[in-house]
Every structure is written in C-alpha cells, then in structure tokens.
C-alpha cells in the first residue's frame, strides 16, 4: 500500500533537493559583494533619501483580492481538466455550476465598479 | 574635483512628501522618458496628483559654447542639440547668421536644404513612432521604424558622410553638391516609403488597443495649448493651424504644394495622426524637390562669407586672401540681434542671435520646442493614471538634448 | 561640496575578481578550465543596461535595430534596471547633474560588471569643454572600453562589444602578429 | 521685402505703444525686420497686458537675457511674443541693474514664460518678481554662480595631453 505513494515521495524528495541546490549553489559559486549602494532601493538612479516603505492606497489591496479570487478559480480548473474524460457529463455540469457562482461574483464586482481604478 | 552630493537635496518649496501621497521618481534612468528626464510624480494610488519635471540632466552649456566659437565652427555644435533632426538645426542656425549678415542663398542650395530637412523630419517621426510604440507595447513597431529610418540615414551618409550629424550647411548655402546617383537613391526612398507607412498604419491606426491607450488621453484645448506655449504637432493636434513652413515660408517652401495636417480634439491619438500625416506630406515635398531641382551654384558667390572654389586659388591672389581670412578668423557680423526660426519635427525651433560685431556670436539663445512642449506636461497629467503618463510623455515627443541645451 | 569617493579597490574580471571557492584549490588544470567556462558564459551573454544619454543612445538603438542586430552577440536584452545588467554603455555626454545618477546606477549593478564609454563625449567630453560637462566618464566610474566616434556607427558599437567579450575571456585585445 | 518680415508690423504699433505709455517706451528698432521695443521695468507688465489683450500677441516664443558687463544697467531681459492670428512678432526688452537684478515676471500675462524665466534666473541670476516657483531648472539646486554671465569664465578643465603628467588627474588614478 505504501508503495503506491513511493513515486510521489521520490518526486517530492527530488523537488526538495533541487530546491536546495538552486538556492545555495549560485551564491556559493559567484560569491557576493554587498556594498552600501546595492542595498539602497533603486529609484531610477536618484540616491533615495527617505525610506521606500510608505503607506499606499487601499485600491491596491482591493485589486489584489479580486485577482486572487479569480486566479484560484483558474487553479481549480486544472485538475478537473486532467480527469474530465473520466468524469464525463457529470464533470462538465459540476464545473459549470462552479464557474456560474464565480460569474455572479464577477458581474456584481463589475457592476459595483471595483474593477475601474478609483480610490 | 567632481562634485557628487548635488541633485540629492530636496528641490522645490513643497518637497516635504505629503503623508497620503506617495512620491515616485520617474527618474533620469527610466526606459520611457526618451532621454534623461526626471519627473517627480505625486501619486494617490494609481492616480497622478502632481508632476514636477526636473530637467537639466543633459544640460551641455551649448549657449556658452556658442559664444566661444566662430559662426562656421558653430554649425557642428548645432547638430548635437536636437539629435533626432540635425539637418534642421543646421539650417536654423545658419538662417540666423544669414539673416544677421544679409546673405542670399542660391536656389539650388535652398532645395538641397529642403530635401535634407524633410528627410530628417521623416527619420525623426519614424524614430518617434518606434520608441513611443515601444513604450505602449508595440515591440515589433520598433523594428519596422528602424528599417525605414536606416534608409534615410543611408541617404544622409551618402551625401554628407555621416549618418546623423550631417553639418551640411555653410553660411550662404550648403557645403557640397549632391553626389551623382544620390537623386536616384532618394527617388527609390520616396517610392518605397508610402508602402512602409501603410504597413505602420495598418498595424496601428485602427488597432483597438492603440485607440484605447491614446484616445482621450492628455487632452489639451486650442486656447490652453496657446497659453501653455506648446508647439509643433502638439499645437496642431489641438486645432491651431500654425506651421512655420506655411506661415513664414523659408528656403523656398512657398513654391511646394503640401497640406498641414490639423487635428480636432488635441489628444494623444491626434498627435499620432499628425505625425504620420506629416511624414506623408514630407514625402510629397521630397518628390516635388527631386522633380524640379534647379542647377547652378550650391553656395553663394559672396567671397566675404563663402570660401572660393579650389580651382580659383591657383589663379587669383585675391581668392587666396579671401580663403586665408575666412579660414583664420571667419567673417564679422553687424551689431544687432535677430531671431530666425524653422519648423522642426517637434515644433518651432528658433535661434535668437545677438552680435556685437565680432566674428563670434555674442549671445546665442535657442528656442527649443521640446522645452516648451515639456512645460505642458504638468498640466496634462493631473488626475491621470500612471500608465497614461507614459502615453502622454510619448506623444509630446520631446528630446532632452534639445530641451536642456 | 562633497569629495569624490572612489572605489578603493577597482573591480577586476574573471579570476582576478577575488577568491571564490574555485580558486581556493590554486591554479591547476581543473580550476583554470572551469574559469574558462565561467568567463565564456559571462562573455557570451552580456546584458547592457538601458542607459541612453544623448545622441550616441540613438546609434545604440540603431545597433539594436534590425540591420545591425546586437543580439547576435549575446546582448539580446537591454535591461531597464541595473540589477539585471552586466554592462553599462555610457552613451552620450555626461552632464554635471547626471554624475551622482551614473555613480548610483553603476554601484547598483552586481559584479561582474563592465563599462563601455561610447562616443567621444563619454570618453573625453568631445567638443564640449565647459562648465556643464564632466571631461570624461572616467572620472566617475572605471571604464573598460573607450569607443571613439561622434556618434560611433552601430557597427563600431558591435566591435566594442566583441572586444569586450575578448577582454572578459582573458584574450589579448590586439592580435599580435604571430 | 525679405522673407522674414512677411507681415512687417507697421510703425503704427510702436506709435500706439508710445502714445499710451509715453515714457514707458524707451526705444524701438526694426533691425532686419524684427520689431523690438525697449520698455522701462515699471511699465513692462502693463505693456505686456496691452499687447496680449488688444494687439493679439498671445503666443510666447521665449524669454532670455543678454549680459553686457560694460554697460550700466547690465542685463537686457528679452521676451519675444507672436500673434498667431495676424502673423506678427514683437520683441520686448527691459533692463536690470547689477547689484541685485530684478525684473517683474510676465507669467501672469503669458503662463508659458514660467520655465523660460526660471532658466533665465538659473543661468543669469535675474530674479523675476511675482514668479510662482522661481528655482533652478537646468543646473543642480546647490550650484553656485550663474554660468551664462560673461564674467563666469569656467571653460572646463585643461586638456591633459599624454605627454603632460599632472599628478592626481591621470585617468588611471582611478584604477589605483
């Protein structure tokens, strides 16, 4: 029983090892030379005087939230698409309901004008 | 030693950043500022509340250097100011000196000047089309534009030996006659270009994204445009029918028949249409210039100003004296001040020349069209999204070498 | 007026760029070949920073254009931010007000980095000898290749990039007669 | 009639200015077809307003200054304006004395002269009273001196030829 999951474990281990390699090999090879100027934020060539950490408008947060909602919806479609052939018509109807719910959300948001940029 | 702590301190009375507005540096090193312009944007989220353009990052002290050079030496300087249309700068500078001294330019030299200026206008508008398209995402347009612009630069090179900085004018005419075979190359250029412009138009003119990004963006009305002092295609896009070639014809422009495109609602899209239409008109002018190019001298015979031809040197002593005097100290102008102006792709390019009777200009003020167009940026970007600031700056078509002088 | 704070140690390329774990083993066959591979990798993909100042920038754009395509030599992308670029082509005249900006952009570029002073104005201020122009970009940042011309033709810029690649690979710039 | 003065403004304009402003108009000249008038600083703003409202000069070309160190009122400040409608052009000049050159600003009449006057302040040191935001535009903010004055002679550095050795300035001083 356990052996059914063996390939998955090997795959995870490989991912983990590759991640470590990618993370630590290049800095070790190239060597890093931090200088004071490199740590400053890049301000189109101007030496910044104030720190770049500033409060910014709430509309960014709103747009980010909307993006996450519809992005996650897209992610759910991938596994569904892989096994759609097995699900046959049941899968199609199921996904239609799922998408319809989010469509209503999209129409509401669009009507509210949250998509246009406005504080 | 070189000072390094300059341009760091806050500038402007209101340099203290307001709490809720974020101050963003669209700084000198920025892909879409068409050179080294720094715009301090005050952003309320994505909406621009205030824009303070900080220029001078390419200030080369041309006006100080002109005072140190004789009139003929100044010609090579005038190339480097507006480096997208150097021939037009040359003609402008030399027109000021000719107006001061009162020299008549022979007709053949006038037509050669018109040909070189219209070539420069096509090359400059092509570059504008390429780079502004690049800012708005038309990556392939850049390569179309450069394919056509290289043809114009080949013509420059065949005539003056240099691709961009031709320095082809002399006071009283042009430096050399057209090499033979050049006119056929020009004719091939004139035949192929309309097709190339159609490529561009088919790609851009009724492209919905191009419409959406440019239509209704950066609108300036005719009255506001005159008050703000904008010039060139930006002024004409707002409906003001003012083109120096029609209003004050110089270099024989009065006997070419071409129209001046005038826009209606003064937004970025109209400025795009102005420039493309101007390219087509320039090709018409080029065709008429090639058809009736007069023969005769290409520089004035007035020995006070123009060098005698080589052949004459061996024959007459007087020519040698003229040659020596002209080469060693140049010619002197009367005391007085004159203003001469030409139509550059960006607008009216003027040269205010004050002379105190010596062989060098006492004061040479250049009226740069980019400086005047850039001044309107502050009014154009109020309450606009940041992405539209890029479109507006692209549509103003300013060149920092011309603006900072 | 602030003094010009120069980099104490000028930047070197390749192995001279200071000890990396590779050179800890000294110059034997293994490390020198690895150096050749690393330098070959660095040389064949130099991404210039999009740093156009004046007229030479137009010829630099010409070099990117379809006729003299600089991406044939590995400089495919002109990166807008100095963080992702290895080469700073100073194309144009350097105004006094631009000095701290050039210094900042150069400092914010990660090593290994190189500089091409494109055109007479960047190399020696060309025809401008007045209050507003720094007499050569050499006074601000160390320069690897000086490219004459006003403006240099796009082909000249390609030649400069090729010479820089040979310099990075450690080959002599000038082919001495055999 | 050479081409520059296609619509030579008749002397009537100068006459009208003379009648209305009397002593305000000091001289006028017609050199090479360019009409120019020299005004007193006091009468400058009224004449400018008159030119814009009644004479239709609505488009500002440029504003600059000329430095005559030998002459007593050292600076001549120049504005050039054009009437797009009837295609004429006039050059307004006024003078400013040395210790502290002051000239009224014309941004209230022609808003386009905002940057031009800032540049004249930056390069000549002439303060424009009434200018909304007079600060340096071309030179760095902390720059001392006014470059375009005739006595500001700083023509860069001496050119170092390869055979001359100036310590501290050799290009490889940086490479160390």
Image (tube, rainbow, N blue to C red):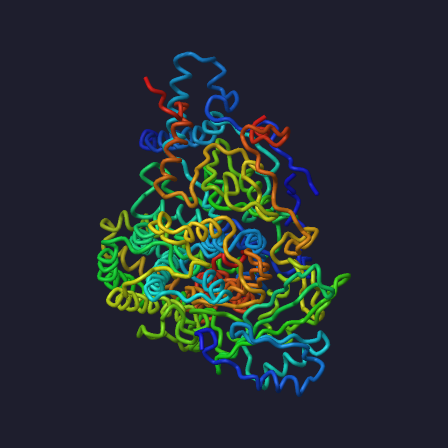
Q: Is residue C18 above or below residue D19?
A: above
Q: Nearer the viewer, residue A19 or A69?
A: A19
Question: Residue D47: where, in percent of width, then height?
Answer: 65, 80
Q: Residue at x 50, y 48 (%)?
A: B328
Q: Residue at x 42, y 73 (%)?
A: B243
Q: Residue at x 33, y 53 (%)?
A: B156
* Res. A67 in view: yes
Question: Residue A113: where, in percent of width, then height?
Answer: 47, 69
Q: How many marks?
A: 0
Question: Residue B33: where, in percent of width, then height?
Answer: 48, 55
Question: Residue B215: where, in percent of width, then height?
Answer: 40, 70
Q: Is residue A6 above or below residue C49?
A: above
Q: Is residue B181 above or below residue A110?
A: above
Q: Nearer the viewer, residue B102 or D162?
A: B102
Find residue D176 and report its image quarter: top right
Q: Is residue A58 above or below residue C31?
A: below
Left or right of A43: which side holds C40? left
Which residue appears farthest toward the right when viewing the image? D99
**Screen quadrant of the C terminus of chain B:** bottom right
**Screen quadrant of the N terminus of chain B:** top right
Left or right of B261: which side holds B40? right
Q: Residue at x 48, y 46 (%)?
A: C92
* Res. B32 in view: no
């Amino acid at each position: 029983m356990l052996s059914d999951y063996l390939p998955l474990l090997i795959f995870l281990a490989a991912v983990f090892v590759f991640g470590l390699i990618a993370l630590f090999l290049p800095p070790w090879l190239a060597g890093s030379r931090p200088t004071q100027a490199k740590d400053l934020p890049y301000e189109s060539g101007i030496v910044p005087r104030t720190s770049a950490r500033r409060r910014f408008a709430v509309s960014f947060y709103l747009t980010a939230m909307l993006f996450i909602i519809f992005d996650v919806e897209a992610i759910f479609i991938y596994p569904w698409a892989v096994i759609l052939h097995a699900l046959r018509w049941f899968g199609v109807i199921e996904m239609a309901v799922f998408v319809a719910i989010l469509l209503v959300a999209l129409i509401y948001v669009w009507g509210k004008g949250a998509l246009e940029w406005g504080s | 030693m070189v000072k390094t702590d300059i341009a760091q301190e806050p500038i402007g009375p209101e340099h203290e950043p307001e709490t809720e507005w974020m101050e963003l540096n669209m700084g000198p090193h920025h892909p879409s500022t068409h050179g080294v312009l720094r715009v301090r944007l005050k952003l309320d989220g994505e909406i621009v509340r205030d824009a303070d353009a900080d220029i001078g990052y390419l200030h080369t002290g041309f006006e100080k250097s002109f005072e140190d050079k004789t009139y003929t030496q100044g010609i090579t300087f005038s190339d480097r100011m507006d480096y997208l249309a150097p021939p037009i700068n040359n003609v402008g500078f030399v027109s000021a000196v000719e107006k001061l001294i009162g020299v008549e330019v022979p007709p053949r030299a006038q037509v050669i000047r018109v040909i070189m200026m219209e070539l420069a206008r096509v090359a400059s508008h092509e570059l504008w089309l390429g780079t502004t398209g690049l800012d708005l995402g038309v990556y392939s347009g850049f390569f179309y534009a450069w394919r056509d612009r290289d043809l114009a630069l080949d013509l420059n090179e065949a005539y003056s030996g240099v691709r961009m900085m031709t320095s082809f004018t002399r006071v009283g005419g042009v430096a050399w006659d057209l090499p033979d075979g050049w006119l056929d190359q020009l004719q091939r250029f004139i035949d192929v270009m309309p097709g190339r412009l159609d490529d561009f138009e088919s790609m851009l003119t009724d492209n919905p994204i191009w419409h959406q990004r440019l239509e209704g963006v950066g609108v300036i009305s005719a009255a506001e445009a005159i008050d703000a002092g904008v010039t060139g295609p930006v002024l004409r896009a707002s409906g003001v029918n003012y083109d120096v070639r029609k209003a004050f014809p110089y270099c024989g422009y009065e006997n070419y028949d071409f129209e001046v495109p005038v826009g209606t609602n003064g937004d970025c899209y109209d400025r795009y249409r102005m420039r493309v239409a101007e390219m087509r008109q320039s090709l018409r002018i080029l065709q008429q210039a090639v058809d009736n190019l007069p023969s005769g001298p290409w520089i004035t015979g007035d020995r006070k100003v123009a060098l005698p031809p080589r052949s004459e040197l061996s024959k007459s002593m007087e020519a040698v004296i003229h040659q020596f005097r002209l080469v060693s100290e140049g010619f002197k102008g009367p005391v007085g001040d004159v203003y001469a102006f030409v139509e550059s792709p960006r607008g009216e390019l003027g040269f205010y020349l004050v002379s105190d009777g010596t062989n060098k200009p006492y004061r040479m003020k250049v009226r740069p069209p980019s400086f005047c167009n850039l001044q309107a940026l502050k009014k154009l970007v109020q309450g606009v999204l940041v992405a539209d600031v890029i479109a507006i700056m692209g549509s103003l078509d300013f060149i920092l070498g011309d603006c900072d002088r | 007026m602030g003094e010009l704070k120069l980099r104490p140690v000028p930047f070197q390329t390749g192995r001279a760029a200071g000890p990396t774990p590779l050179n800890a083993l000294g110059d034997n066959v293994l490390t020198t070949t690895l150096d050749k591979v690393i330098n070959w990798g660095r040389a064949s993909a130099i991404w210039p920073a999009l740093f156009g100042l004046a007229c030479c920038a137009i010829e630099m754009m010409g070099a990117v254009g379809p006729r003299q395509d600089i991406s044939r030599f590995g400089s495919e992308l002109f990166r807008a931010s100095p963080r992702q670029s290895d080469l700073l082509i100073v194309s144009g005249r350097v105004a006094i007000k631009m000095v701290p900006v050039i210094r900042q952009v150069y400092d914010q570029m990660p090593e290994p980095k190189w500089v091409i002073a494109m055109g007479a104005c960047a190399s020696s201020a060309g025809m401008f000898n007045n209050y507003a122009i720094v007499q050569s970009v050499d006074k601000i940042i160390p320069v690897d290749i000086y490219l004459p011309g006003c403006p240099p033709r796009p082909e000249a810029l390609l030649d400069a990039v090729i010479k820089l690649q040979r310099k990075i690979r450690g080959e002599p710039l000038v082919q001495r007669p055999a | 009639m050479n081409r520059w003065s296609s619509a030579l403004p008749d002397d009537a304009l100068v006459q009208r200015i003379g009648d209305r402003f009397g002593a305000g108009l000091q001289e006028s000249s017609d050199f090479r077809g360019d009409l120019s008038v020299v005004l007193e600083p006091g009468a400058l703003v009224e004449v400018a307003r008159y030119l814009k409202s009644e004479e239709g000069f609505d488009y500002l070309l440029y504003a600059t200054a000329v430095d005559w160190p030998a002459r007593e009122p050292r600076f001549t400040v120049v504005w050039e304006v054009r009437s797009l409608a009837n295609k004429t052009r006039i050059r307004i000049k006024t003078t400013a004395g040395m210790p502290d050159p002051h000239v009224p600003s014309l941004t209230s009449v022609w808003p386009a002269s905002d940057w031009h006057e800032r540049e004249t302040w930056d390069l000549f040191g002439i303060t424009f009273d009434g200018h909304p935001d007079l600060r340096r535009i071309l030179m760095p903010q902390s720059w001392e001196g006014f470059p375009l004055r005739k006595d500001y002679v700083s023509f860069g550095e001496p050119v170092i030829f390869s055979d001359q050795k100036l310590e501290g300035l050799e290009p490889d001083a940086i490479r160390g």
